Amino acid sequence: MKKLIYFLMLFIGSLMFSQQTAFKFDFGGNRVEKGFIPITSTSKFNKNIGYGFMDISDLQYIDNNGSALTGDFITSKKPFYFSVAIPEGNYDIILNLGNTKGVSQTTVRVENRRLMLNHMKTKQGEVVEKTITVHVKDSIIRNQKGEKIGMVKLKPRERKYLHWDNLLTIEFNDKSPKVCSVIIQPNKTAKTIYLTGDSTVVDAQYEPWASWGQMLPYFFVPKEVVIANYAESGETLKAFEDRHRIDKIWNLIKPGDCLFIQFGHNDQKYGNSEKSGYKKRLKEWIQKAKQLGATPVLITSMNRRVFDENNKIINTLDDFPDAMREIAKEEKVNLIDLNTLSKTLFEAMGPELSKKAFVYYPANTYPNQPNDLADDTHFNPYGAYELANCVVKSIVDQNLPLKKYISENYKNFNPNKPDDAKKFHWPESIFMESLKPDGN
């Protein structure tokens, strides 16, 4: 009987925690700030309490005395992950990072390697407060009353993703990440940008694969805007409908939000834009978004890495980029012409240097990779970052309404002069896989 009561209490406690939306965590040792939940180097994730580290094997805490909140911290020599059971929604996460008796260097990503803070350094004795804004999702489709009305049909590989697991997961990475505290608060006012698309947009979980969608949050002002990436590898417009991914968005999107639409790579397998129903579905999505008070933004698919004898990019996307341009004019919606921008970018890199932007790696670079990787469609983090720069450049150059939300992280990118791949900073996550994403 006592055991039954004990497990019942644990279940009720876990249920209450999972419904909670605001948290204050003090990372460090035994000294805890009033009103905060203590997180130590031994706080391994426990589903019964709903929070903790994915792995504690290399964690350590340092106590410099002083403030209970900022005088101690958790650190590690390898990436570490902190997860919290939290309901679907948008959240501001306030981080205290640094060392009152030293320096720190931290890169912060969330869920499936979604870039939030990059290479953030603190000076000797400095602790800084940084805010990031994150969209947390689950696969349940709910109506306006919060009642379950359906499910997103996830692929088997998606069930391993960190962004469908009913947890918020924060990745702390870099040479010397030092985390003093984490505060999580709901954000009910942020403009949400919903991303739809394929493997070139998806939040890719595994190194060395990446997409522009998971780099985009880095370029927007937190608290004001949040990126909600619903793209998935291998998808077409039709598949996105059939798996109810777009239904999920229709039941979440609100007036003032944006819907980014980028499809083409996989749609072309089913014939031209007319035969595949591409144009028809694009128009339907645009009209539906407008009806819901949201702003649709079309994005032409980027080029593949295919050069002619004159080192010029060859169009391998048939009529799909032109079809999207035509629909944008007909429906009077904004267009980000990533197809044209990527052509400029890849030609500026040239046939050889452009390999640095794609998944080109010799055999055995990654675990279980006996053969060379040579993929002319999918990007590594550097290539994904450059393409995200192109997306933001288009927003700025066209003076789109979203321009006012672009952060100082954007540095007037010029695709004719790509960033030096050797100087691109990306400390790798622990998740690695040589298997190519779905689609081509």
Image (cartoon, grey):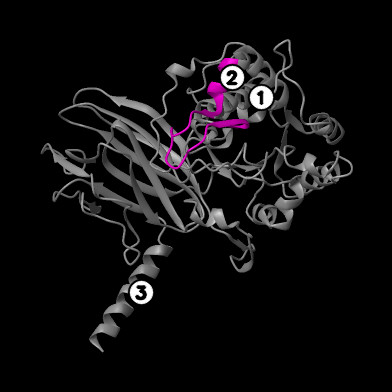
Residue 210 seen? yes
Q: Are marks 2 and 3 in contact (CB under 8 Å)?
A: no
C-beta proximity under 8 Å, tags 1 and 2: yes
* Image location (x, y in percent) of residue 66: 12, 37
Which mark is nearer the camera, 2 or 3?
A: 2
In this figure, which residue is indicated by the disc labeled 3? 11
The image shows residue 30, relative to residue 210, as above or below, that is: below
Residue 249: x and y, percent? 65, 52
Which segment is the magenta one?
352-379
Amino acid identity at mark 3: Phe
Residue found at x 21% / y 43%: 69
Residue 67 placement (x, y as % from top left): 16, 40
Neighbours of disc 1 within 10 Å: few (<14), some (14-19), many (20+): many
In this rendering, would 374 be left or right of 334? left
* Residue 357 highlighted magenta (yes or no): yes
- Tell me the residue that label 1 is attached to: 305
> Up-down: is 127 above or below 346?
below
Q: Can you tell which quarter of the image residue 104 is in?
A: top left
